[in-house]
Image: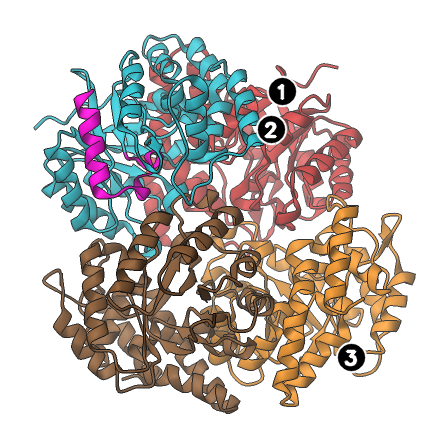
Chain colours: A red, B orange, C brown, D cyan
Amino acid sequence: MKKLNIAGIFPPIATPFANGRVAHDRLKENLDRWNKTHLAGYAVFGSNGESVYLEQEEKLALVDTVKQNLPQGKLLIAGTGCESTEATVRLTNLAAERGAHAALIVNPHFYKAKMDNAALKRHYLTVADQADIPILIYNVPKFTGVNISPEVVASVAEHPNITGIKDSSGNIAQVGEMIATTPPGFHVLAGSAGHLLTALALGASGGILALANVAPDECCRIFEDFRGGRHAEARELQLKLLGANKAVTAQFGVAGLKAALDMVGYFGGDPRPPLLPLGEEQRNELREILKRANLI
Amino acid sequence: MKKLNIAGIFPPIATPFANGRVAHDRLKENLDRWNKTHLAGYAVFGSNGESVYLEQEEKLALVDTVKQNLPQGKLLIAGTGCESTEATVRLTNLAAERGAHAALIVNPHFYKAKMDNAALKRHYLTVADQADIPILIYNVPKFTGVNISPEVVASVAEHPNITGIKDSSGNIAQVGEMIATTPPGFHVLAGSAGHLLTALALGASGGILALANVAPDECCRIFEDFRGGRHAEARELQLKLLGANKAVTAQFGVAGLKAALDMVGYFGGDPRPPLLPLGEEQRNELREILKRANLI
Amino acid sequence: MKKLNIAGIFPPIATPFANGRVAHDRLKENLDRWNKTHLAGYAVFGSNGESVYLEQEEKLALVDTVKQNLPQGKLLIAGTGCESTEATVRLTNLAAERGAHAALIVNPHFYKAKMDNAALKRHYLTVADQADIPILIYNVPKFTGVNISPEVVASVAEHPNITGIKDSSGNIAQVGEMIATTPPGFHVLAGSAGHLLTALALGASGGILALANVAPDECCRIFEDFRGGRHAEARELQLKLLGANKAVTAQFGVAGLKAALDMVGYFGGDPRPPLLPLGEEQRNELREILKRANLI
Amino acid sequence: MKKLNIAGIFPPIATPFANGRVAHDRLKENLDRWNKTHLAGYAVFGSNGESVYLEQEEKLALVDTVKQNLPQGKLLIAGTGCESTEATVRLTNLAAERGAHAALIVNPHFYKAKMDNAALKRHYLTVADQADIPILIYNVPKFTGVNISPEVVASVAEHPNITGIKDSSGNIAQVGEMIATTPPGFHVLAGSAGHLLTALALGASGGILALANVAPDECCRIFEDFRGGRHAEARELQLKLLGANKAVTAQFGVAGLKAALDMVGYFGGDPRPPLLPLGEEQRNELREILKRANLI
């Protein structure tokens, strides 16, 4: 069994809302623009897609809309991780039925202290056994308070239905360890544009990057420059994007990502409560940061 | 408008499963026993009830079962907090329809860094405005990574539909600050049996305590001894229960709480995956701890 | 061998500086005032005494000054904990020579992750064996990032030269566990006025409290009201002091403690760099907080 | 004024002890071997040199020994950061008198919460103004609990006497930000072999690496392969060393570093208490890890 090849740059797309409901027309407009770039596909309802604020039917409708607007050759990844193992399998297979190619499964995390190596290993193996599509582990300690160890990743990486991991820990040595201790064909993907180039330098196959919503061309260019051996160009662009990347992630969060989308010509809109939209002063600061990165 | 009086001891009841499904008959048996104690009521699908592993219909069915077995004068509190404000209101009002007297609303927490004072304040005021039953704030940083500040609590405590807070932070000075800065009639409840007596000494009105699943009489006795001015007795019992309380919370978690239920004659059973049940060695250690606390 | 009885309220006294040097005359003035209160003694160069900014000779000179101004019956405790076991023994015995009655030994902490149970146990037993005066363990995770477990405390509590522990963790259940699992005669002391009353309610023998620098009478009154069975009075005063205590500890730190000393009529002065003194706005806020607590 | 050029690989050398005293003869033997490698110099009494366990005279004697055995062209960096600003200046200038070329100044950290941007900025500017040799900022949150922000680094980087920073945070995006926002000639150095290659890929000028004690040739080879454009070789070696690097840092700490020195033919010995030496089982595990990395 050959693993699904997940390489290149994917945005975990923001979920557009109008009057509190998912705005599928706006999403379609965004997709029309993103489709003109070199993005390798889309991750829907990941953590930047406000997954935790979406009902199951809303999630599946998002799969439908992206699927209907997905060019040949691009991949559709659905963020189907839930707290319970059973619910994760169920949602994964519903997304598969609607056409998702792969599932991004966040570490279960409410009972953080009990999500030890044994619990995470059982979880991922069970999901992988029962899922109808390949799965990617999703490690994002800043949101979950849980970090999956390279030892667990190595121990499940041979499973034919576990195709890789998105690591957003920001711990680049850990990314390297995951690459060093998993078999060829297991894909380690950067989880933030802040460490895209460095993850590639260690052997990552791409990235699932919030910033790729706003700066798809630039993110793809780092990937392509690196692959093409144009290290100086890749480095220069990586350094230039760091401030913008921080702005749409740690600094301003999902509300900042959506405001940035609005500023660069996509539809962003407001996040769902309890997330607050940016205030005017924050928007001004964000605009300056995007200008400095040549994104507007 | 007079606030709902929430005083005394409540267990956040464990959710019994058999073959992976909610075992309502087992829950009824547990309730029959708990009903013979001085417990002031029950909290269903709180964090010890594996709320994050339950589907909406399972939650509402739990409300039904407890309601049908609820003696006059005891309160039914439902753990209806969700990540989104809108979903929280919706689930709260569904639980209200089925007979819940109050709702326990955990801090939204996935986007931890953005759950600042302004976001939490808006969340709780919105939910309180739209909820058909009184709400209790639920602060449990060990699971959520979010701590609500006493300042926010004070700023929303006058809302007629916010009746109090369950604080499980373990930060007793913070519990005191919440008592000192909120109006009379706002109920501050201990969130762990580990600080029950000390919270009472500062003016708390009771506690919602995992340990009260296993040791309802003992927890009620601390409350009653304290109220009756029997400080030495209350202190002695409080100290004796600390080890058992730690065992069924931080040390062994929900799986430990359920194993302890089995050991003291209730039905506990296994938690849902990804939580692992206790191994044999852990069970032996737990049994010794319960014996030392005179619970078996 | 009977353990030294450490009961009542002790301030970990601020170290006054003038032109960057220790101002022994100012310290003497402060001591003259403190000596008129019911304080049970003084802790010199604890964490509130800017121990980490003092040279060894400065520390020993502080012992001298306090010793010369120490009324009969009051205790002098010196904060002699260092990172290395050997240096801790050496400084402890130098302080003992100069007249200190007991030593407060902070957990070594630079190599946090390696300060496990075995390392801490060996450290405290070695120091206790070699120290010429009784030692108190000092647990202050907010500064050290290390928490000593109740298990280690219980395992060393029988040592005749380990007289007790100051616990500043703020984890009141842990304070209770330490009381419950150590022999009578082992003194558990509150490490912050924020949990003074609650620690007493569990059996603590007193407190070493930053706030006792500024509000010695009030801190002593909580202790005496509690001992005298005047629970309502103790509770009322405890609640009133919480804001002021937070101001001179977590909120404004040592600089705030010193500014508060100036405001209530003692000498405070500025901390040593790199600590910054309070700005004007912070001073105004602090003054309001002290007023609300009836301290000015 | 041209800044001191700090490039290449430096080990923060372990301090050898025999019978509890610094073993200068053993240190000389180690230096004789290290001197045959391409190491650019040595950092003495950094965090891996058990700085916190050394007396001032021991530190200065270490400067002497290294200086006397230092080949022309290699740099001697002394870890002279103390908690107080004044003590830092004093020790820095004593080390300068004894021949140190530069000083590595760890963030002051006992009062973590107060080491904000303003306090750190004042500290570093004051030290830089008064130091007789160039200084390197040293950021090591795992030991200090303090992270210096890229904003502070950028704000002091123009100071002619601040020559760079050693960043051991492991946050590679932050390393990149420091490179992107400081002027050319400001040296950003990797603080761990775990992110050496990736830091170089972003523009770092070298590294001060615990692993370089044990594997100086390998660490230098990564640096030279990278500089020479041999990316594949650099990557392969970087991945191979990750496990060994983790073993002598996070996993086994200073005791592990010293045990590894013994295993590869240098003198390591035991750390000072309270650090515990490795047990037999840990030594066996360490030996296997070093074998897998081809270091023995």
- Specify whether residue D26 is painted magenta: no
Q: Amino acid at mark 1?
A: Phe
Q: Quadrant of the N terminus of chain D?
A: top left
Q: Do marks 2 and 1 share a chain?
A: yes
Q: Which amino acid lies under the numbered mark 2 shown in the image of this protein?
A: Ile
Q: Is residue C87 left or right of residue A102?
A: left
At label 2, counting other C-alpha atoms closer than 10 Å, the crowd grade (few under 14, some 14-19, many 20 or more) is: many
Disc on res. A165: 2
Residue A135 placement: quadrant: top right
- Residue C222 shows in this picture: yes
Disc 1 sits on a residue from what chain?
A
Which residue is found at the position 44% from the left and 9% from the top? D233
The amino acid beneath tag 3 is Lys
Q: Residue at x 13, y 34 (%)?
A: D96
Which residue is most to the front?
Answer: C1
Which mark identifies residue A186?
Answer: 1
Does residue D185 lie above or below A87 as drawn? above
| Residue B134 visible somewhere in the drawing | no
Disc 2 from disc 3: Cα separation? 49 Å
Residue wearing tag 3:
B74
Is B96 situated above or below D195? Answer: below
Which segment is the magenta one? D45-69
Q: Secondary structure at mark 2?
A: strand
Which x, y percent locates residue C121?
A: 50, 52
| Farthest residue, direction left | D1
- Report the Cα–Cα distance between label 2 and label 1: 8 Å
What's the chain of the residue with tag 2? A
Q: In front: D123, or C1?
A: C1
Q: Between marks 1 and 3, how big is the CA–CA gap? A: 55 Å
Q: Is residue B196 left or right of residue A228?
A: right
User: Could you tell me which secondary element the residue under label 3 belongs to?
Assistant: loop
